[in-house]
Amino acid sequence: MAGMNANTLFSQALGLGGQWNVVKSEMDVAQRQLRLELDFPAGTKFACPRCGQLCAVHDTVDKEWRHLDFWQHRTDLRARVPRVTCAEHGVLQVEVPWARAGSGFTLMMEGMILLLAQQMSVSAAARLLRTTDHRLWRVIDHYVMAAHRDKDWSKVRRILVDETSARRGRRYVTNVIDAESTDLLMMAKDRGADTLGEFAAAMTKHGGRPEQITEIVMDMSPAYIAGAAAYFPGARVVFDAFHIMKMAGQALDKVRKDVARKGGDLRGGLWALRGNAWTRNSEQQERRSQLMAAYPALGRAVALREFLQDALAGSDRSQLEAWLAWAQRSRLAAFRDLARTIKRHFNGILAYMETRLTNGVMEAINGLLQLAKRIARGFRNFYYFRLAAYLKAGGLNLQAPRLLPT
Ligand SMILES: [Zn+2]
């Protein structure tokens, strides 16, 4: 180390070898900036980026790259990048070992950007790195979409289709999730039948075929049902029990409001009647018994909801049929409506009872989508949200540059 000059030191630290060397290093302490100039010796030949043939330099183009900070100093690299004349491919710009063509960041800096983007919002990462959000998104876009394109879907058999709000209560997007790996395979801008057509087309680009899909789990959205029939005619539709129980909860709420409208005293009823035994405290439990005894309609509604929950937890078709028969003669309009809906979707509900798909998958993915929303904070348009969602939930094999000299 003794006597090593700054240029040699920076060349080694950058891992430069062969043709390239740091030829000038300037430190602006006041501006907290380090500028390194890289160059190659006259007469050096460079490989044609297409065929690898060593070619003479035609001319050069000045370029700049932002690198990892040197201690507290922002570091920029500059070089004149050669264009070579290849006998076969003409005049082309060569690749430099420290950066990707077209990027204004070095590879190590891109590695840092990808690391930070998985831990904090892109806006926060931009502030930390003293650059703009848009420049970071371009890097994320490159690596995430490349990894997404390379993702192999040939083993996907069961998918889950679900909608998520991209912005609070406003725009909805459709997520297609591999029910086994729980990887988010595709996020589509819409929630219509064509989203499934889009997924069917994408399958062929990812080494798969639509015919390999055996089950599609979804809520009872007519658009998804139509899409499954049109694009995946061989797949079995499975209705998610979570959505069915949500509807049962809504039916119970209707009965409760009806009783209240007719003068019932339902104070404390909202929480006492909702949910499951393990979510209620003893006070709520007692109130619940009182209400069910005082208002028989409410008692029946609560019992119907619980019977349905038990039926769905089992795999006995006759239990679901028994529930239907009871709900239909229950004299509770909300539950008669629910019975009609369940009857109409009977096979898909039975498919759920047999396959038990969905349990936990959506919960796992929803947590990751919340993180994606945080990453894309301030950039809630579809494109950025999707990028962040693929980054967090896509199960991608991200080819991020290493934070070490190559
Ligand atoms: Zn060539």
Image (tube, rainbow, N blue to C red):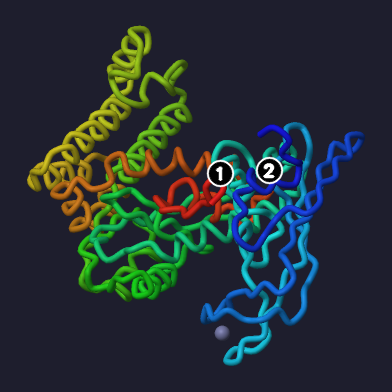
- The quadrant in which the N terminus is found is top right
Disc 2 residue type (three-letter): Leu
Q: Position of residue 394 (x, y in %)?
A: 43, 52
Q: Is residue 170 visible?
A: no
Q: Residue at x 57, y 61 (%)?
A: 142
Question: Where 170 falls versus 91 (above or below)?
Answer: above
Rendered-image quarter of ligand 1: bottom right
Residue for badge 1: 403
Disc 1 residue type (three-letter): Leu
Q: Position of residue 85 (x, y in %)?
A: 67, 85
Position of 101 with respect to 62 (left or right) is: left
Q: Nearer the viewer, residue 52 or 277?
A: 52
Question: Where 155 falls versus 77 (above or below)?
Answer: below
Residue at far right of view: 30
Gap between marks 1 and 2, in whole Å?
9 Å
Specify which label sits upstream in the sequence, 1 or 2.
2
Q: Position of residue 302 (x, y in %)?
A: 28, 29
Q: How would you rate the neighbour count of disc 1 (Cα within 10 Å): few for under 14, some for 14-19, many for 20 or more?
A: some
Question: Where 212 falls versus 58 (above or below)?
Answer: above
> Based on the displayed image, in which of its 4 quarters is residue 54 positioned?
bottom right
Contact between labelled residues 2 and 1, with CB atoms less than 8 Å apart: yes
Q: How would you rate the neighbour count of disc 2 (Cα within 10 Å): few for under 14, some for 14-19, many for 20 or more?
A: many
Residue for badge 2: 68
